[in-house]
Image (cartoon, rainbow, N blue to C red):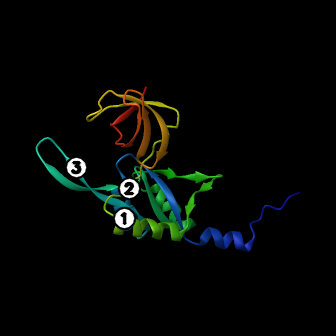
Amino acid sequence: MTNFTPTQTEVTDLNKPKWIVVYTKSRWEKKVDKLLKTQNINSFCPTIKTKHRWVDRTKIVELPLFSSYLFVRADLKDQLKVRQTMGVVNFVNHCGKPASVNNSEIERIKKLIENYDNVEAVSLPRIKVGDTMKIEDGVLLDWQGEVLKIKGKSVVMFMKQLNCALVVNTEKTAVSLV
């Protein structure tokens, strides 16, 4: 019969606090961060300042860098408290265990948002090389092109109508798949 008793190093690893990725309810990132800090749990919700425009005014607001995610430095005991906190959906899991992030990566994120104003997490999983895109805004409204290259927020598109390639800095509403 196999022995399933954890070794001493496995037990100390579980009790050692590490940065864990937490998935929250939509738009609850900052609230959950505040709730965790009131429980003396070390949490980190990276935020960026951005200009937000309404019909009647423009204001600089602080938004989470990662929508619905934040980081918590917690040992096994604190993980239970985190899960029970209002607004927490669950931990992000990898291979059945909460996904952890190296301390050096957390420090890199902190330095990045401290030193740069124009930081944005961009997810473009639906756009890939070879797709046909239509521009939804600006001077080239309704023009179509084939995606040649994607790098961050920049999309290089071949525009048949113009017989040239354009580099487009995309906004989420600026392009759509055809």
Mark 2, secondary structure of its residue: loop
Q: Earlier in the sequence, mark 2 or mark 3?
A: 3
Q: Which mark is residue 99?
A: none
Q: Which residue is mark 1?
A: 113
> Which residue is at the front of the view, 148 or 71?
148
Disc 3 crowd, CA 10 A, few/some/many (<14, 14-19, 20+): few
Q: Which residue is mark 2?
A: 65
Mark 3, secondary structure of its residue: strand
Label 1 and label 2: CA atoms lie apart by 9 Å
Q: Residue at x 37, y 30 (%)?
A: 162
Q: Earlier in the sequence, mark 3 or mark 1?
A: 3
On the rendered structure, is 71 left or right of 34?
right
Q: Residue at x 30, y 32 (%)?
A: 140
Mark 1 touches mark 2? (CB < 8 Å): yes
> Which residue is at the front of the view, 46 or 90?
46
Q: Which residue is mark 3?
A: 52
Label 3 and label 1: CA atoms lie apart by 18 Å
Identity of the amino acid at label 3?
Answer: His
Q: Residue at x 24, y 55 (%)?
A: 61
How many badges with numbers are in the image?
3
Identity of the amino acid at label 2?
Answer: Leu
Q: Earlier in the sequence, mark 1 or mark 2?
A: 2
On the rendered structure, is 105 left or right of 63?
right
Residue 31 location, x and y as percent?
A: 33, 56
Identity of the amino acid at label 1?
Answer: Ile
Residue 105 location, x and y as percent?
A: 51, 66
Q: Residue at x 44, y 50 (%)?
A: 152
- Above or below, 20 relative to 25: below
